[in-house]
Amino acid sequence: DQQVKQNSPSLSVQEGRISILNCDYTNSMFDYFLWYKKYPAEGPTFLISISSIKDKNEDGRFTVFLNKSAKHLSLHIVPSQPGDSAVYFCAAKYRGSTLGRLYFGRGTQLTVWP
Amino acid sequence: KAGVTQTPRYLIKTRGQQVTLSCSPISGHRSVSWYQQTPGQGLQFLFEYFSETQRNKGNFPGRFSGRQFSNSRSEMNVSTLELGDSALYLCASSVRDRGLRETQYFGPGTRLLVL
């Protein structure tokens, strides 16, 4: 059973606009959330993370929001650039576990067009 | 610093055969994890090794096994291959810094095709 869900398999956004990628989770024992970006023929690359004690974390153009009551997180990319076109994975870690064991969503293909 | 390396990058096998995949973590990283990525299931955790000991195991049949060597390099083995084992197998290594912040890095993966 998928404990981390990304319900949108794809998202298409114009360059310069905001991209919002969504992720839902079912288990309240998750205490740390991460977003990864993946290009074809490469492994996932870490983007940004957030602890469950926070509700927002920013890093440059990337901001992650966490709504614990809704068990929902989102990744905002502003402004979107063509180089951001990739598959984005949401991942979660159990409280007390290590980053070596993550639960991933199925990914969202982001396409940023000029 | 060199990244996580995986060999081979591509592999074709037939049903019933076995396969061994190799992963060399980033120097100094003692934790190595393996994931299977398929179009239908996304990334699924296989197992994690730390200092030559399996620390976590995912929900995969016993045909999937792994090990870690004293130099932190890791191998995973799949015996009696099935068509459904066709996937991208990703290895990741992680390290915890003095601030106890852990960072994980993925290799490029091994693409396995079972015919």
Image: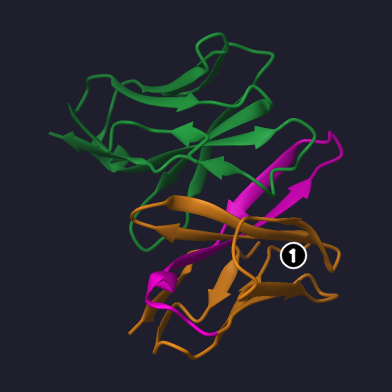
Chain colours: A green, B orange
Q: Is residue A24 left or right of residue A101?
A: left
* Chain at tag 1: B
Residue tagged by mark 1?
B27
Look at the image and tell me whether residue A64 can be seen: no
- Residue B65 versus residue A112: which sits nearer the camera? B65
Q: Residues within 10 Å of mark 1 (few under 14, many from 20)?
A: some
Q: Is residue B77 left or right of residue A113?
A: right
- Residue B57 versus residue B35: which sits nearer the camera? B57
The amino acid pointed to by label 1 is Ser
- Residue A52 versus residue B14: which sits nearer the camera? B14
Residue B54 spot, x, y in % from top left? 79, 63
What residue appears at the point 45 percent right and 39 percent down from the top-left corner? A105
Residue A19 spot, x, y in % from top left? 29, 24
Magenta stretch encompasses residue B86: yes
Position of residue A15 relative to residue B7, above or below, is: above
**Seen from this angle, which residue lies furthest left?**
A114
What residue appears at the point 40 percent right and 43 percent down from the top-left corner? A106
Q: Is residue A67 left or right of residue B96?
A: left
Position of residue A50 relative to residue A87, above or below, is: above
Q: For the N terminus of chain B, give its image quadrant.
A: bottom right
Q: For the C terminus of chain B, give its image quadrant.
A: bottom left
Magenta stretch encompasses residue A69: no
- The quadrant holding residue B66 is bottom right
Residue B79 spot, x, y in % from top left? 57, 83
Residue A82 spot, x, y in % from top left? 23, 38
* Residue numbers of the magenta segment: B80-107
What residue appears at the point 22 percent right and 23 percent down from the top-left corner? A16
